[in-house]
Image: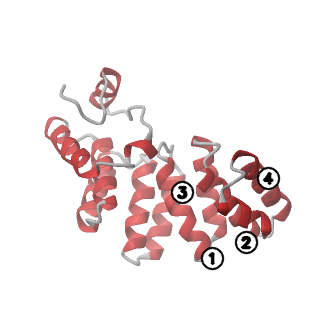
Amino acid sequence: MEEGIPFCDICWQALEKGATPPMDFPDYFSDDLEAKLKQVDTLLFTLPSNHFLWYLKGHLEHELGDIKKALRSLNSALNYNERFGDSWIRLGLVYSDLHREDDAIDSYEKGLEHPLTDPTNLIDAGIPLIASGNPRLASRLLVRALDLIPQDDRALVNYGKALVQLGELEEAGKVFEKSLQLYPHNEEVLRGMAR
């Protein structure tokens, strides 16, 4: 197996079995996305019905701004495994970019019904929902993100903001206090505490 996602034997074995390989999603999506998309395309030639590879392809295409291709790839991922929650959440983000907010919300709801492994999707979906006045759904997404990465500054701060919008001020205060302990110099944390 040539170098890939970065692939180890355990990752390759997981893909061959149709499972999700262990990955550091925030790190994976942080750089060199075009090269990673080429790697995923190469792997799809070998495993054309692997839902996880189709998900990665759609996520990468979306990050690179190719919305139409991302939409097709994510729908392919869901055709192969409609219970892979990450595909639904990323599909919701694509719909949101297309200004199809009802479809986005439906996709987020479907994604929350299933196991999730990629916290970047959940955070990316939760933040704009706070701004658009849907703090209940935002908080559900952000709680799931915090289940995966409990000390993420973006997830914590924005979960606190959602709780403020929901009027759950005592709980919001606890979240902001935790955020402040972990990230005492983070401007978002300080602004959240000031509210």
- Tell me how many marks there are: 4
Give me the residue at 34% from left, 59% from top.
Answer: 63
Above or below, 75 against 97 in this view is above
Q: Which mark's residue is nearer the viewer, 1 or 3?
A: 3
Residue linked to disc 4: 177
Mark 2 vs mark 4, CA separation in Å: 17 Å
Judged by depth in the image, the label closer to the viewer, 1 or 4, is: 4
Circle 1 residue: 133
Residue 194 higher or lower than 90, as above or below? below
Q: In which quadrant is the N terminus drawn? A: top left
Residue under numbered circle 3:
123
**Marks 1 and 4, the one that precedes in the sequence:** 1
Q: Are marks 2 and 1 in contact (CB under 8 Å)?
A: yes
What mark, if any, has residue 165 been given in the picture?
2
Q: Determine the CA span between mark 3 and mark 2.
A: 17 Å
Q: CA distance from mark 1 to mark 3?
A: 16 Å
Residue drawn at x 58%, y 56% is 141
- Check disc 4: other Cα within 10 Å, few if <14, some if 14-19, many if 20+: many
The alpha-carbon separation of the residues under discs 2 and 1 comes to: 8 Å
Neighbours of disc 1 within 10 Å: few (<14), some (14-19), many (20+): few
